[in-house]
Amino acid sequence: MSVGEVCNRDVVVVKKGESALDAALLMRRFHVGDLVVVEEEGGQRIPVGILTDRDIVIEAVAEDVNSRELTVGDIMSADLVTVNEDEDVVDTVKMMRANGIRRVPVVDRAGVLVGIVTVDDLIDLLAEVLDDLTKLIRREQTREKETRR
């Protein structure tokens, strides 16, 4: 299964010049813990960083910095790791583990943002697969009881 099949395509984005306060307000409004930082190129959104609620707490709140004066570009994680939408989910999990990251922007072959995949998304997928396997086992046991009386 490809990561493009499981990623969230409703990505909340922000630009580097926005204030940390505006970013925090976006997170609150959309109930998300991260924003993908993008630059517009030819009408396309190209991811250049990611900003998490933790970044805001550590870089602004804990340092007692005015969040209206601090920009997203000042505190975002710029060493961005992305994954192509055609990449296998298992390979993506391994890459996330190797990089110690919980969220990964998903891009197409041209590097344009198409979604984001998070640990939460992957846990939901795993739970669904485990539920299906459990139902399969129950169905097999029921079928055997019915055919071998």
Image (spheres, rainbow, N blue to C red):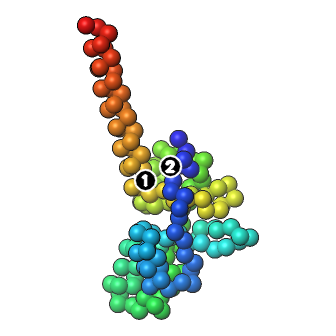
Residue at the extreme right: 42
Q: Secondary structure at mark 1?
A: helix
At 44% from the left and 85% from the top, the residue drawn is: 21
- In what quadrant of the picture does the C terminus appear? top left
Looking at the picture, tell me which residue is in the foreground, 82 or 141.
141
Looking at the picture, tell me which residue is in the foreground, 41 or 29.
29
Q: Which residue is mark 2?
A: 6
At 51% from the left and 81% from the top, the residue drawn is: 72
At 40% from the left and 75% from the top, the residue drawn is: 28
Looking at the picture, tell me which residue is in the foreground, 65 or 127.
127
Looking at the picture, tell me which residue is in the foreground, 128 or 17.
128
Q: Which residue is mark 1?
A: 121
Q: Is residue 93 left or right of residue 61?
A: right
Total label count? 2
Labels 2 & 1 near each other (Cβ < 8 A): yes
Residue 124: image x %, image y %?
A: 39, 49
